[in-house]
């Protein structure tokens, strides 16, 4: 007499069969294929597939409308008719109207308020999107995608690198450092060699706090895909626990390249105490 399969095994098989059916159904309905390099628990895959199915159906049913139509066609006066105080007030209401419809606009704080208001009312309002009626769906826009600001983008990378080098902050290094890395002389080197130098530097102090990052020189080269920046970084370091912090200033030289993803990455970095 054959032994009955445990309920757990039956549930596993049933869910696996349901997942395969969902894949076939979506491929027939929406096209595409499903690939997996590593085994995924069927219960996790099932949740994922059902979520993809919801998104695909919402996408198929969505109509294309402008941002202005999406937020209900509110009336906002042209920027030229507003004074500084009125711009601030209207911009606050404008961002609230976008947020109400789950629209996020990211921008650097250096963008003038008048320019931000103008951009939203004259450009973003005309931008066409799919009206996805899906719970939790949010639209994201970056002002810098329309008006790139390499110097500010690079400043963010420099700040991340500084917190890693001086404050021992754990960050995704492959995000800010280029795989084609060079040493202080501009010669090809393994990134691990650079990390060894950083680890040796970290061993020389207990803690450090960055007080200031001051840009001394910035050059964006003609190709717009490579740049150089020199910064002075003021750091307070503590040699050991309960010891006083001592202030030091470091010069940091960085060479960067624009990755195909649109992210600026460091491919060479030198630093030393002044």
Image: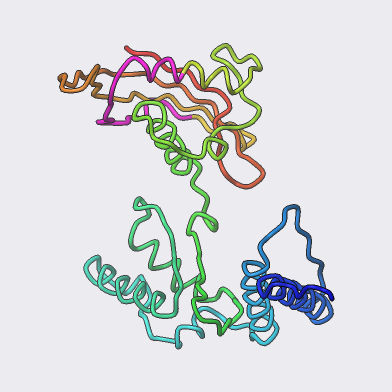
Q: Residue at x 51, y 40 (%)?
A: 172
Observer-nearest residue: 80 or 99? 99
Observer-nearest residue: 170 or 147? 170
The region drawn magenta spans: 198-218
Dividing the picture into quadrants, the one containing residue 72 is bottom left
Q: Where's residue 18, x and y in %? A: 74, 78
Q: Is residue 213 magenta?
A: yes
Q: How many marks?
A: 0
Determine whether 269 is above or below 256 in the image.
Answer: above
Q: Where's residue 131, x and y in %? A: 58, 82
Indicate the quadrant containing the N terminus: top left, top right, bottom left or bottom right.
bottom right
Q: Please identify the residue farthest to the front as the structure is shown.
A: 1
Determine whether 258 is above or below 9 in the image.
Answer: above
Q: Where's residue 185, x and y in %? A: 57, 11
Determine whether 195 is above or below 31 in the image.
Answer: above
Q: Is residue 209 magenta?
A: yes
Horizontal side, residue 186 vs residue 27: left or right = left
Q: Where's residue 91, x and y in %? A: 32, 71
Q: Residue at x 82, y 76 (%)?
A: 24
Indicate the quadrant containing the C terminus: top left, top right, bottom left or bottom right.
top left
Dividing the picture into quadrants, the one containing residue 12 is bottom right
Horizontal side, residue 15 vs residue 20: left or right = left
Dividing the picture into quadrants, the one containing residue 43 is bottom right
């Amino acid at each position: 007499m054959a032994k009955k399969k445990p309920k757990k095994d039956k549930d596993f098989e049933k869910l696996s069969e349901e997942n395969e059916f969902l894949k076939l159904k979506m491929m027939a309905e929406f096209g595409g294929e499903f690939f997996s390099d590593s085994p995924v628990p069927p219960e996790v895959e099932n949740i994922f597939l059902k979520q993809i199915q919801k998104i695909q159906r919402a996408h198929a049913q969505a109509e294309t409308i402008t941002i202005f139509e999406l937020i209900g066609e509110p009336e906002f006066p042209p920027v030229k008719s507003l004074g500084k105080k009125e711009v601030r007030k209207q911009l606050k209401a404008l961002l609230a109207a976008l947020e109400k419809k789950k629209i996020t606009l990211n921008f650097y704080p250096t963008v003038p308020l008048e320019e931000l208001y103008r951009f939203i009312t004259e450009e973003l309002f005309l931008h066409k999107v799919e009206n996805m009626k899906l719970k939790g769906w949010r639209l994201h826009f970056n002002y810098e995608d329309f008006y790139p600001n390499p110097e500010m983008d690079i400043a963010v990378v420099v700040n991340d690198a500084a917190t890693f080098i001086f404050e021992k902050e754990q960050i995704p290094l492959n995000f800010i450092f280029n795989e084609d890395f060079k040493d202080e002389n501009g010669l090809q080197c393994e990134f691990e060699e650079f990390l060894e130098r950083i680890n040796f530097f970290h061993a020389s102090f207990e803690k450090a706090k960055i007080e200031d990052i001051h840009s001394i020189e910035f050059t964006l080269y003609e190709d717009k895909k490579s740049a150089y920046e020199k910064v002075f970084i003021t750091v307070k370091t503590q040699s050991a626990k309960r010891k006083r912090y001592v202030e030091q200033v470091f010069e940091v030289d960085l060479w960067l390249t624009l990755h195909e993803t649109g992210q600026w990455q460091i491919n060479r970095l030198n630093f030393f105490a002044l």
